[in-house]
C-alpha cells in the first residue's frame, strides 16, 4: 500500500513538472523582427533575444524604414531593425531586460527605442562600449529615458 502511494505521488509530481514546463514553453513571448537580409548585427540582436527566452520570427526586407513607418515608430529614432512584441514596437538594439521590464510593467507607450547603433549594445558588442539610453516612446513620438546603460 505504501509503495502504491509513493508511485502515485511520483506520478502526480511528474505530471505537474511536465505541465509546468509546457506552460512555460508556451509562454515564450513572440517577437517579429523586420531586418535587412545583409545585416549581421541584427542577427546578433536576435540571438540575444533568443538567449533571453523570446521566440523570434524574422522578416527580411530591403526597406526596413517602411516597416518602421507602418508600425508608427518615428524615423528620427531609427536603427537597423524594427520589431513588434504584442502591442509594442521595439526599435534598434534594445536590451532584452528592458523589453522584459516593459512587458512586466505594461507601460502605456508605443514602445522602446535605442536610436542608431551604439557600440556595446546587444548585437553591437565591442571592447570599447559607449554609454547609451533606451527611450520609452509615446504614441505621439515624444520620448523619455527608460533605462541607462
Image (cartoon, helix red, strand yellow):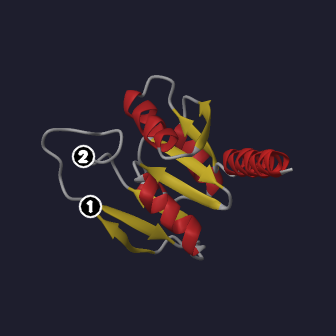
Residue at the spot 68% in from the left edge and 57% down from the top edge: 86
Pick the front one: 10 or 144: 10
Q: Is residue 76 visible?
A: no
The residue that mark 2 highlights is 120
Residue 24 position, x and y percent, is 67, 50
Residue at the spot 60% in from the left edge and 33% down from the top edge: 58
Residue contact at pointers 1 and 2, CB within 8 angstroms: yes
Mark 2 residue element: loop
Residue 13 position, x and y percent, is 73, 51
In the shown orientation, is residue 45 left or right of residue 58?
A: left
In the shown orientation, is residue 148 left or right of residue 97?
A: left
The residue that mark 1 highlights is 149
Within-10-Å neighbours for mark 2: few <14, some 14–19, many 20+: some
Pick the front one: 134 or 3: 3
Mark 1 residue element: loop
Q: Is residue 42 visible?
A: yes
Pick the front one: 97 or 73: 97
Dot 1 or dot 2, earlier in sequence = 2
Residue 135 position, x and y percent, is 40, 66
Within-10-Å neighbours for mark 1: few <14, some 14–19, many 20+: few
Vertical arrangement, residue 144 with respect to residue 119, above or below: below
State the CA–CA distance, disc 1 to disc 2.
Answer: 9 Å
Residue at the spot 39% in from the left edge and 27% down from the top edge: 40
Amino acid at each position: 500500500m505504501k509503495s502504491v502511494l509513493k508511485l502515485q505521488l511520483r506520478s502526480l509530481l511528474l505530471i505537474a513538472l511536465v505541465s509546468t514546463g509546457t506552460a512555460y514553453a508556451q509562454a515564450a513571448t513572440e517577437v517579429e523582427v523586420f531586418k535587412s537580409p545583409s545585416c549581421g548585427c541584427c542577427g546578433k540582436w536576435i540571438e540575444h533575444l533568443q538567449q533571453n527566452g523570446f521566440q523570434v520570427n524574422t522578416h527580411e526586407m530591403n526597406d526596413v524604414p517602411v516597416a518602421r513607418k507602418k508600425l508608427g515608430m518615428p524615423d528620427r529614432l531609427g536603427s537597423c531593425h524594427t520589431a513588434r512584441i504584442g502591442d509594442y514596437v521595439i526599435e534598434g538594439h534594445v536590451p532584452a531586460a528592458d523589453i522584459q521590464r516593459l512587458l512586466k510593467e505594461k507601460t502605456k507607450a508605443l514602445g522602446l527605442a535605442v536610436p542608431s547603433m551604439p557600440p556595446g549594445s546587444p548585437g553591437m558588442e565591442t571592447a570599447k562600449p559607449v554609454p547609451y539610453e533606451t527611450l520609452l516612446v509615446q504614441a505621439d513620438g515624444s520620448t523619455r529615458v527608460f533605462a541607462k546603460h
